[in-house]
Amino acid sequence: MRWNKISDAVIRRLPLYLRVLDELARESDTESISSQELGVKAGVGPALVRKDLAWFGEFGKQGVGYEIGFLRDELRKILNLDSKISVALVGVGSLGVALTRYHLKRYAEDESFNLELIALFDSDPAKIGMTVQGIPVFDLKDVAAQVKEKQLKIVIIAVPASDAQEVANAFIQAGIQGILNFAPIKLQAPDTVHVVAADLSLELQRLAYYIPKYTG
Amino acid sequence: MRWNKISDAVIRRLPLYLRVLDELARESDTESISSQELGVKAGVGPALVRKDLAWFGEFGKQGVGYEIGFLRDELRKILNLDSKISVALVGVGSLGVALTRYHLKRYAEDESFNLELIALFDSDPAKIGMTVQGIPVFDLKDVAAQVKEKQLKIVIIAVPASDAQEVANAFIQAGIQGILNFAPIKLQAPDTVHVVAADLSLELQRLAYYIPKYTG
């Protein structure tokens, strides 16, 4: 792995910077941006912007700032978004279908969102063989073959908590390298597989902390 | 605000600890847990567990660890989850409906998930007046009155990016205190309103970083 000492907190902010640069490239003719302005738009302090980017190279110039097109290309390379990554989703229920639509919309709108959703999986015979928004639903039994054939690198897990670990295991054995997990359990995975928890309930519980208690 | 020097990274882990304690309370008769064991189950190092909890008090005993029932109660108090918090969701599309179902399931299953979803909002006349899973859909025009009447504290935003800021503004003006934002834009909000971004596309872009490049 490249730059393997860099903390996940830094990596977390890179897509935010990339989004700001993409918007600027779309909406204006400006060629450069200061760390101050990039910070404001990304919701990050300017010193932190400079520090984050300095991990990967010298992208800015004193008094000029960052050249937008160049920094964009560099960020895409750093994030592996300069070429397509094939993504799968498992669990074609209400959440899975909503996430599929959301994903396709982002893919169509955002040129730096180079993650292509190309395969869905479910174990329900009524769903296997269907398509959702044009994407085929495969049998969960065929994970190994499909991951290999389609070079799937990332799986989005949208199955109930009780099934999530078993489903994750099947994808891990098949060679998947990243998991975005919407099931409300902590998944066990080897160090070679990166797991991101997208857990609505944890996020809401975290928000609750910030609600002043006696306001009402 | 209480403990206002504590970083969000700490707050982020508290619901994980609470979930582990809830599971233990449900599934076993064990009365105490070591920081080691709590760490393993939550996916956090034991030293960090001790450090996180020490911000809020002396909960552990040397050689015994943490008393499960007590620590659970304390974490619920810290996270404001010892009494109900009323939540709204705006945007009754495919994602909004899926999130509603997901939310209700978590609410039914998890006794520490004390966030009750009681109002949905949309601007589509065809949806206003409907119920989704028993929860009424209100007109977005009535945000101010409903937030006040129902004491809504948190809103989940599931509208398209182009509408998200306007919708957020209406809830902020009405006095909401927390926002969970699923729209892929950075929301502007005053410091008194806490915003958590639940942005699938940013999470996937972050995951892409961890995919080794030439494996295929």
Image: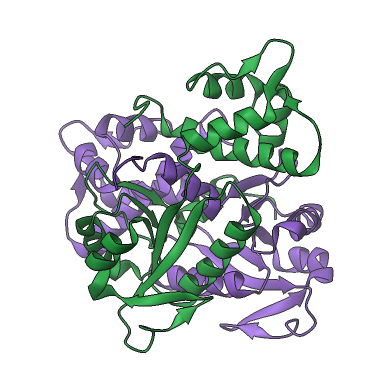
Chain colours: A purple, B green
> Where does the image place residue A214, in percent across and percent down from the top left?
32, 40
- Which quadrant holds residue B122? bottom left
Task: Depth check: give the residue in front, B39 or B63.
Answer: B63
Residue at x 40% of width, y 68% of height: B119
State left or right for residue B211 relative to residue A38.
right
Q: Is residue A3 visible?
A: no
Task: Depth check: give the residue in front, A81 or B2.
Answer: B2
Farthest right residue in view: A141
Identify whether A161 is placed above or below B127: above
Q: Quadrant of the C terminus of chain B?
A: bottom right
Q: Is residue A188 visible?
A: yes
Residue at x 75% of width, y 44% of height: B26
> Where does the image place residue B144, in percent across and percent down from the top left?
22, 65
Q: Quadrant of the N terminus of chain B?
A: top left
> Where does the image place residue B6, in percent across and percent down from the top left?
40, 26
Identify whether B156 is placed above or below B203: below
